[in-house]
Image: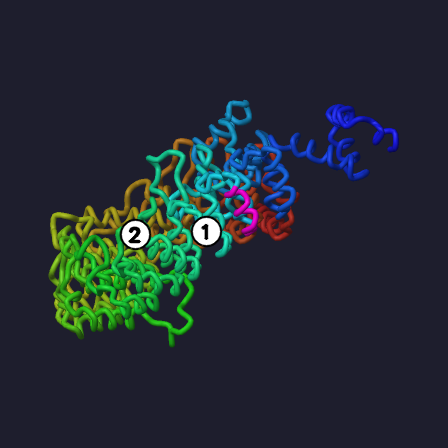
């Protein structure tokens, strides 16, 4: 040490110039004279590396930053880092990682776009586009950490207060969709996600550092805190947008006092500051914005007002809150043609959200509809572009409480639009979130208050025809039967509105849905029986769907047995292994004599039936079916019975004259094959048959 200190200062500088970084740091820690030479040299070496300055900003090291700046560090030089697997959800750590995750995701979701698969192949082949960069400066880092003293130091040394970062702020991907930028939340994309370019003021607001944000504003930070790399893809984001979407009342107040910003400025998603605060909702921020001149009837990006949106998604408490603050009860969406009352009547579910803490109770659809009718009674007669009035939407959703309320306030039960009436809308309801009982109550209310059962929809279908074709109601037969009876009692005709259209017959529609009791009800009230063509279709449907009750019903019509009794009808039913239906066909005269090209008879197929085959085999044998008929390969009914170990069928066949000496396709006799099986009863039956033949 003494030897070093004895050297001239110029020599010491030369030594330090040639020392490695670790050696230089050791020299600086030895004594004050060497520190005064080596330490400034360390900072001069590090001044061109922006990561060192950003590290000092993150840790809050004022002295370190002062010395770096004194050594000539540029506060505006950005750090540029490749975004890794956990930073960019669209790009993983490497080609194999990307392909592995894609394969796992394809197993869970086979509908991933083909462009994504092509991208994975391109990545594996090394042709992937470059990774996005994380870009930021020391001022961004200081703002994120809330180090006001470092922010001041950097600004005093020429830092650009409006410099932008990319991929740096932690609010991505959480808030970028609301602020109008493409979401980064989707793991797979056909292109890398675009990172918004945020200024330090946004970072301070996003982290809730009010003092830092106010400091930046006092130094002249721009109101615009976010821009897109491509100006065509989005509008700028302001500090007011950011503070509103984060629900920070104090920062929102500070931004408005400093900038007096335009409260109607929108993000690329079409939302103003009030619309952004509504998304969560932050009622304190909304209250502040409204008091400062924000329009309560502002439109969202989807074309609805805030009140209309609240009514549409079932946020009824928030809707009442907005009405109390002056929201127009007649303004819902698309100008004055779509009222909040329409949207309440169309609402079928409630989105979860934070209910106002001071709200006394949760509101129902009926509650908010009453509030809307009280605030704007004209809404009950206002129409949408399709001329739909609220009662039509309520009837379609089977909201019988709303239907009753609307009728009580003067709504017309016979209301109609370009497509349907209230009654046809109810009869064709999809029952989304509703029960058959709701449908029953809705139809009953409409009819009770004068809805016509004869008025048709745009397709010339009556309410009864629509009800008979209603698929969601197919599994609720009792309700459908009650509704049909109600409509008929009030004068509905059981006939098709268009006699030339056979497929639209109410009776046929019910038959197809297996509502046989309802078919009988229509016929009992004078419906015309099906014609021969319809009967043939009904027979084929009942056989194909294996519906014994439906088959018995259709075969009761005059001429049906004759239409049914085609040469191959019984054979085809047996081939489908539907024994009960086949037995009904046989009982009604279906021929059993058909033999296929391979030699298979109806009796042979009946012996193969999985269920209910024994009784049909008995009927076929008593009718004269040959118990010894052979297929082209030499199989007889007794072979099938032995193979299935069905002792009852074996005894039946033997009693009706089956030959116990028959040798199967393998050359072995029936007795030999039965001896190898588990059923001793079959062997005994065969032996008894031999004894009878000897006698």
| Closer-to-camera residue (307/311) | 307
Residue 528 visible? The answer is: no
28 left or right of 465 in image: right
254 left or right of 687 in image: left
- Secondary structure of residue under mark 2: loop
| Closer-to-camera residue (333/50) | 50
How many marks are shown on the rendered structure? 2
Magenta segment, prevailing SS (helix, strand or loop): helix
Residue 147 colored magenta?
Answer: yes
Q: In the image, what residue occupies the spot 52% across and 33% down?
A: 133
Q: Which residue is mark 1?
A: 613
Q: Percent from the top left, x then y, of residue 192? A: 46, 34
Distance, label 2 to label 1, CA atoms, is 83 Å
Q: Is residue 430 above or below residue 628?
A: below
Q: Is residue 281 above or below residue 662?
A: below
Q: Earlier in the sequence, mark 2 or mark 1?
A: 2
Q: In the image, what residue occupies the spot 13% across and 59% down?
A: 416
Residue 295 bears which disc, if any?
Answer: none
Q: Quadrant of residue 380?
A: bottom left
Q: Quadrant of residue 287?
A: bottom left
Mark 1 burial class by Cα count in 10 Å: few <14, some 14-19, many 20+: many
Q: Is residue 611 above or below residue 405?
A: above
Q: Which residue is mark 2?
A: 262
- Secondary structure of residue under mark 1: loop
Q: Percent from the top left, x then y, of residue 137? A: 53, 39
Q: Percent from the top left, x then y, of residue 155? A: 50, 43
Q: Residue furthest bottom?
A: 360
């Amino acid at each position: 040490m003494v030897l070093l200190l004895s050297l001239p200062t110029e020599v010491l500088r030369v030594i330090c110039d040639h020392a490695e970084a670790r050696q230089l740091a050791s020299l600086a820690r030895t004594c004050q004279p060497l520190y005064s030479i080596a330490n400034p040299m360390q900072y001069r070496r590090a001044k061109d590396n922006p990561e060192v300055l950003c590290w000092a900003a993150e840790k809050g090291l004022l002295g370190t930053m002062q010395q770096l700046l004194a050594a000539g560090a540029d506060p505006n030089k950005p750090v540029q880092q490749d975004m890794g697997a956990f930073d960019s959800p669209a790009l993983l750590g490497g080609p194999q990682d990307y392909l592995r995750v894609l394969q796992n995701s394809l197993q869970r979701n086979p509908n991933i776009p083909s462009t994504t698969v092509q991208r994975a192949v391109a990545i594996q082949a090394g042709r992937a586009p470059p990774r996005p960069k994380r870009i930021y400066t020391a001022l961004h880092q200081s703002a994120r950490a809330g180090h006001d003293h470092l922010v001041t130091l950097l600004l005093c040394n020429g830092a650009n207060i409006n410099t932008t970062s990319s991929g740096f702020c932690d609010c991505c991907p959480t808030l970028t969709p609301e602020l109008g930028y493409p979401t980064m939340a989707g793991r797979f994309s056909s292109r890398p996600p675009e990172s918004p370019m945020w200024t330090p003021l946004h970072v301070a607001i996003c982290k809730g550092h009010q003092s830092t944000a106010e400091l930046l504003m006092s130094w002249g930070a721009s109101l615009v805190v976010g821009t897109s790399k491509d100006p065509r893809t989005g509008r700028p984001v302001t500090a007011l947008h950011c503070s509103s979407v984060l629900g920070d009342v104090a920062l929102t107040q500070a931004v408005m006092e400093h900038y007096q910003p335009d409260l109607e400025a929108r993000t690329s998603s079409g939302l103003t500051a009030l619309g952004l605060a509504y998304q969560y909702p932050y009622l304190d921020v909304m209250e502040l914005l409204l008091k400062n001149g924000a329009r309560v009837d502002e439109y969202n990006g989807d074309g609805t007002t805030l009140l209309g949106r609240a009514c549409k998604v079932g946020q009824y408490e928030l809707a009442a809150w907005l009405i109390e603050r002056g929201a127009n009860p007649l303004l819902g969406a698309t100008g004055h043609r779509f009222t909040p009352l329409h949207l309440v009547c169309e609402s079928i579910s409630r989105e979860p959200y934070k209910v106002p803490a001071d709200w006394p109770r949760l509101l129902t659809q009926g509650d908010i509809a009453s509030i809307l009718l009280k605030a704007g009674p004209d809404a009950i007669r206002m129409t949408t572009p399709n001329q739909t009035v609220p009662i039509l939407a309520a009837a379609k959703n089977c909201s019988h409480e709303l239907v009753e309320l609307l009728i009580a306030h003067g709504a017309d039960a016979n209301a109609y639009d370009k497509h349907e009436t209230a009654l046809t809308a109810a009869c064709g309801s999809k029952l989304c979130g509703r029960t058959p009982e709701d449908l029953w109550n809705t139809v009953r209310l409409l009819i009770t208050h004068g809805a016509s059962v004869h008025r048709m929809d745009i397709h010339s279908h009556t309410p009864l025809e629509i009800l008979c074709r209603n698929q969601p109601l197919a599994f609720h037969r009792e309700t459908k039967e009650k509704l049909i009876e109600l409509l008929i009692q009030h004068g509905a005709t059981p006939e098709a509105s268009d006699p030339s259209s056979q497929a639209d017959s109410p009776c046929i529609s019910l038959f197809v849905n297996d509502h046989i009791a309802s078919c009988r009800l229509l016929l009992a009230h004078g419906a015309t029986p099906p014609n021969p063509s319809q009967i043939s279709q009904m027979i084929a449907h009942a056989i194909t769907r294996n519906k014994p009750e439906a088959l018995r019903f259709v075969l009761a019509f005059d001429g049906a047995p004759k239409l049914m009794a085609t040469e191959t009808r019984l054979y085809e039913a047996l081939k489908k292994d539907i024994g009960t239906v086949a037995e009904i066909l046989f009982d009604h005269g279906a021929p059993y004599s058909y033999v296929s090209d391979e030699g298979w008879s109806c009796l042979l197929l009946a012996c193969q039936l999985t269920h209910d085959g024994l009784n049909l085999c008995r009927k076929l044998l008593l009718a004269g079916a040959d118990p010894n008929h052979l297929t082209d390969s030499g199989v007889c009914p007794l072979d099938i019975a032995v193979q299935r170990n069905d002792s009852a069928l074996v005894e039946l066949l033997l009693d009706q004259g089956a030959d116990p000496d028959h040798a199967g396709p393998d050359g072995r006799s029936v007795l030999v094959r039965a001896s190898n099986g588990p059923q001793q009863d079959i062997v005994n039956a065969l032996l008894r048959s031999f004894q009878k033949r000897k006698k």
